[in-house]
Amino acid sequence: MTKFNRNIPYNSSPILPPRTNLETTKVLRKTIDASRALAKLNGMLSNLPNPTLFLDTIHLQETKASSEIENIITTNDDLYRSLVEDKKFDNPATKEVISYKEALWNGLQPIETRPFISANLCIEIVQSIKKNTASIRTIPGTVLKNTKGETIYTPPSGEAIIREKLDDLETFINGEDPIDSLIKMALMHYQFEAIHPFSDANGRTGRILLLLYLKLEKLLDTPAIYLSEYIIKNKTDYYTKLRKVTENNDWEEWILYMLEMVEYTANKGLERLKNVTTLMDQMASKIKETIPKVYTKELVEILFRLPYTKRQFLIDAKLGTPKTVGKYLMELEKFGFLISEKVGKEKLYLNHKLMGILEIP
């Protein structure tokens, strides 16, 4: 194996799986913990009366966190308001996050009908994120630098080489082998980031692939998990352990990091989901008790689909005429369930208790 040189394109990067013992005692123990946590989350999602109810909120939280890793920062308030305001984006960062959410959704659709992650799907995802016709890097000279301006990694160079490496990765992802799926996910993620196939949005594309893989492997029927939340909290470790695989072939620490990420975010997601469903049940009971003429199961679901709602959402759900649903929302605000805010010519209504749960770090 050629000694790694960070200043030379890593065209000699080996294909997967690596020739080393991946299933060390530490890794196997952690794999069990991560798998259990993921199974608990999947079980709760599967048992929800409407498993798709919270998907928009969960996917937006994940895309917000993933974008934050790339220093694309927006607030929950800006993000959810923009979505409800028919995509009137005042903040460029918010626009990027919404594009990322659409890219995630666009990536999930093909997996439903054809369980296969391809190089072409990766290209479609990056194009969806960037809203352009981006494809494989063709111009040489791409390097990754640290905050001091020092080169820390030079990814493979040359379109033919990059495409060949993506094809090898595609074969590995979709192939049958005895490697545990979560360990395989760690290998896959490293390899994609090492190939660095695009001029921009490699990190965000790579993190979308993680969610698609969980769906592909039936580890999460509904890919409702904030994996990027863990990376934000442990960003330095993420990049350090990636580099250690490249420089020292240190797979164990990288795999343990990824398994810890899955366990942490699955447990956190389970806790958050329990808090949201408890709040939803409590709010439904209180609405039924205080303003019974307003209460319907469908109304409560609308209030929890996203933190913000508006009159049109209730009209679209056929809950009444514009005048009737307007009265419903005013009553909900009067009794403290919602807080209204005038935006342009319309009012948005915030489920402030739901937003409070989402804001908990």
Image (cartoon, rainbow, N blue to C red):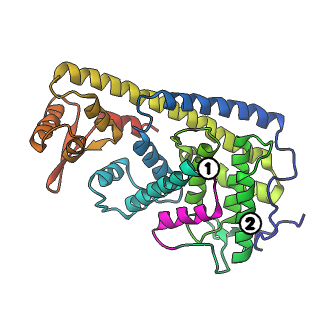
Residue at far right of view = 1
Residue at far front of view = 113
Residue segment shown in magenta: 115-133
User: Percent x, y for residue 140?
Assistant: 67, 80
Q: Residue at x 64, y 60 (%)?
A: 118
Q: Nearer the viewer, mark 1 or mark 2?
A: 1
Tell me the CA gap for discs 1 and 2.
Answer: 21 Å
User: Percent x, y for residue 97?
Assistant: 43, 57
User: Percent x, y for residue 131?
Assistant: 45, 68
Q: Residue at x 36, y 52 (%)?
A: 79
Please name the amino acid that badge 2 sits on. Lys
User: Percent x, y for residue 305?
Assistant: 35, 40
Q: Which mark is residue 165?
A: 2
Observer-nearest of 149 and 311:
311
Q: Residue at x 78, y 34 (%)?
A: 28
Say few, some or many: other residues with alpha carbon within 10 Å of mark 2 (under 14 / 14 to 19 / 20 or more): many
Q: Which mark is residue 115?
A: 1
With respect to residue 335, does 189 lie above or below?
A: below
